[in-house]
Image (tube, grey):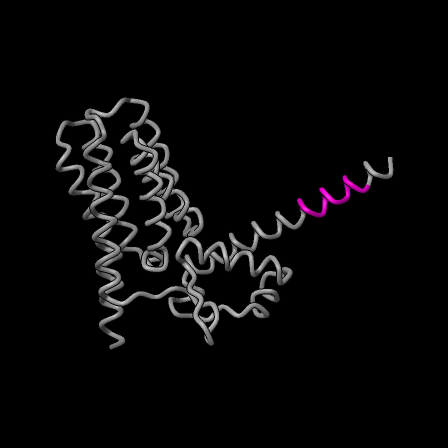
């Protein structure tokens, strides 16, 4: 019984630690998404521990995970920072993201099945609802869910995973536009147009729209870089 009790306590401690790490990752990602930590901001462990009321271990694990995703950058004698990009890096990253997006969309059989259309309409309704309430976390999650459902229709999970990786990599670039009214309006309109095109047979028009959909954030970030030169 003692052994069982000890094992049970160890499992509880491990579960609690995992929960804390997950929560810190989520909150740190959220702070980056919402622009509370802008690109280039230093991420000091002691500050994050106090902000999230978490252990150093959990904070470090969160930084390691977001570094793995490419959102956080670690440099010698500087420490961890929210990743920022040069104009060349932005263009190069989006070249790859646009190629992956175009290929995935061209692989979607059209007209799309009614089940996919129904799923995307439901996700779009959630997206619009969160936008109306100004719920930034909801906007972010509903937007990504919409695109992953769309890309998933290409039938290639490896291509979808690559797109997901680039969606995460461009998070600091996309973040500001989640709270931008004009950006949200354009995004909502384009989502509706995507759903409409999925019910037709013009794959190239749909692919071009999905590529153009990404350019608002890209252009905005490049303009901000130019302003700071």
Q: Residue at x 15, y 42 (%)?
A: 208
Give the percent coordinates (x, y) of residue 18: 62, 48
In the picture, measured across the screen, residue 52 lies left or right of residue 64, that is right
Query: What count of labels does the image hold?
Result: 0
Q: Is residue 86 above or below residue 141?
A: below
In the picture, measured across the screen, residue 23 lies left or right of residue 219, that is right
Question: Is 124 a magenta residue?
Answer: no
Q: Residue at x 44, y 58 (%)?
A: 67
Question: Is 14 a magenta residue?
Answer: yes
Residue sitting at the far right = 1
In the picture, residue 104 is in which quadrant?
top left
Give the percent coordinates (x, y) of residue 54: 63, 60
Q: Is residue 104 above or below residue 72?
A: above
Q: Residue at x 36, y 59 (%)?
A: 172
In the picture, residue 228 is in which quadrant?
bottom left
Give the percent coordinates (x, y) of residue 37: 44, 66
Report the magenta stretch's main SS.
helix
Q: Residue at x 62, y 59 (%)?
A: 57
The image quadrant where one finds the C terminus is: bottom left
Part of the protein shown in magenta: 6-15
The image quadrant where one finds the N terminus is: top right
Q: Is 68 in front, or is 43?
A: 68
Q: Is residue 59 above or below residue 192?
A: below
Give the percent coordinates (x, y) of residue 22: 56, 49
In the picture, measured across the screen, residue 166 lies left or right of residue 103, that is right
Q: Is 136 in front, or is 40?
A: 40
């Amino acid at each position: 019984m003692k052994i069982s009790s000890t094992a049970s306590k160890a499992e509880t401690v491990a579960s609690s630690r995992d929960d804390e790490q997950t929560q810190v990752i989520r909150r740190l990602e959220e702070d980056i998404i919402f622009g509370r930590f802008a690109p280039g901001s230093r991420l000091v462990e002691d500050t994050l521990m106090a902000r999230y009321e978490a252990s150093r271990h959990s904070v470090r694990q969160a930084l390691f995970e977001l570094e793995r995703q490419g959102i956080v950058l670690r440099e010698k004698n500087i420490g961890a920072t929210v990743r920022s990009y040069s104009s060349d890096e932005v263009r190069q990253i989006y070249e790859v993201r646009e190629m992956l997006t175009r290929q995935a969309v061209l692989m979607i059989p059209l007209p799309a099945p009614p089940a996919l259309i129904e799923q995307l309409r439901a996700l779009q309704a959630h997206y619009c609802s969160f936008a109306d309430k100004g719920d930034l976390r909801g906007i972010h999650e509903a937007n990504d869910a919409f695109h992953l459902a769309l890309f998933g229709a290409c039938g290639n999970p490896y291509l979808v995973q690559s797109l997901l990786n680039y969606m995460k990599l461009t998070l600091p670039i996309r973040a500001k536009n989640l709270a931008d009214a004009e950006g949200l309006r354009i995004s909502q309109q384009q989502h509706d147009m995507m759903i409409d095109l999925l019910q037709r047979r013009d794959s190239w028009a749909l692919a071009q729209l999905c590529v153009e959909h990404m350019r608002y954030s890209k252009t905005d970030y490049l303009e901000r870089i130019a302003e700071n030169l």
